[in-house]
Image (tube, rainbow, N blue to C red):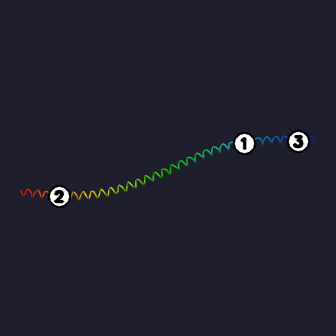
């Protein structure tokens, strides 16, 4: 009976020791889970912030791309208009040269007429 009592006492001590270890493990597990949940929440916030930043940057990129397309189109229009103006200027210069030649011819004729009139007087 004494042997059984001793074994019982030993088993009770062992049980108490294991219960204590279980409580320690549960406490550690609880602390680890709490830390994990906090870290998870922090990572979720960071992820959401990064996702918001990405969406914002994507919107900005699309806007800038469209703006760039508009600027490129305006530049193409300006180049075409410049080309048309250069052609028009070239035509006007040619017409001016022709008119100047006509004027020179008229001046020569006028001088001839004035000379003939002077001779006639």
Q: Residue at x 17, y 58 (%)?
A: 106
Position of 114 with respect to 22 (left or right) is left
**Residue 67 placement, left or right of 51:** left
What's the distance in space between the residues labelled 1 and 3, CA to CA? Answer: 32 Å
Q: Quadrant of the N terminus?
A: top right
Q: Which residue is mark 2?
A: 106
Identity of the residue drawn at 72% across and 42% down: 30
- Disc 1 and disc 3 in contact, CB within 8 angstroms: no
Mark 3: give few (<14), some (14-19) or many (20+) Cα within 10 Å: few
Q: Residue at x 52, y 49 (%)?
A: 59
Q: Position of residue 69 (x, y in %)?
A: 45, 53
Label drawn at residue 30: 1
Read off the residue under disc 3: 8
Relative depth, front residue between 105 and 120: 120
Mark closest to the chain's N terminus, 3 or 2: 3
Q: Secondary structure at mark 3?
A: helix
Front residue of 1 and 90 = 90
Viewer-nearest of discs 1 and 2 = 2
Looking at the picture, how far across and down is residue 17, in whole percent?
81, 41
């Amino acid at each position: 009976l004494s042997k059984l009592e001793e074994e019982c006492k030993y088993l009770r001590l062992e049980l108490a020791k294991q219960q204590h270890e279980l409580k320690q493990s549960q406490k550690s597990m609880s602390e680890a889970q709490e830390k994990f949940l906090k870290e998870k929440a922090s990572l979720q916030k960071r992820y959401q912030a990064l996702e918001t930043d990405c969406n914002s940057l994507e919107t900005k990129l699309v806007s800038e791309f469209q703006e760039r397309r508009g600027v490129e189109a305006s530049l193409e229009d300006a180049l075409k208009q410049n080309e048309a103006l250069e052609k028009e200027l070239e035509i006007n210069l040619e017409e001016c040269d022709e008119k100047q030649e006509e004027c020179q011819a008229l001046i020569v004729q006028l001088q001839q007429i004035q000379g003939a009139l002077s001779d006639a007087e």
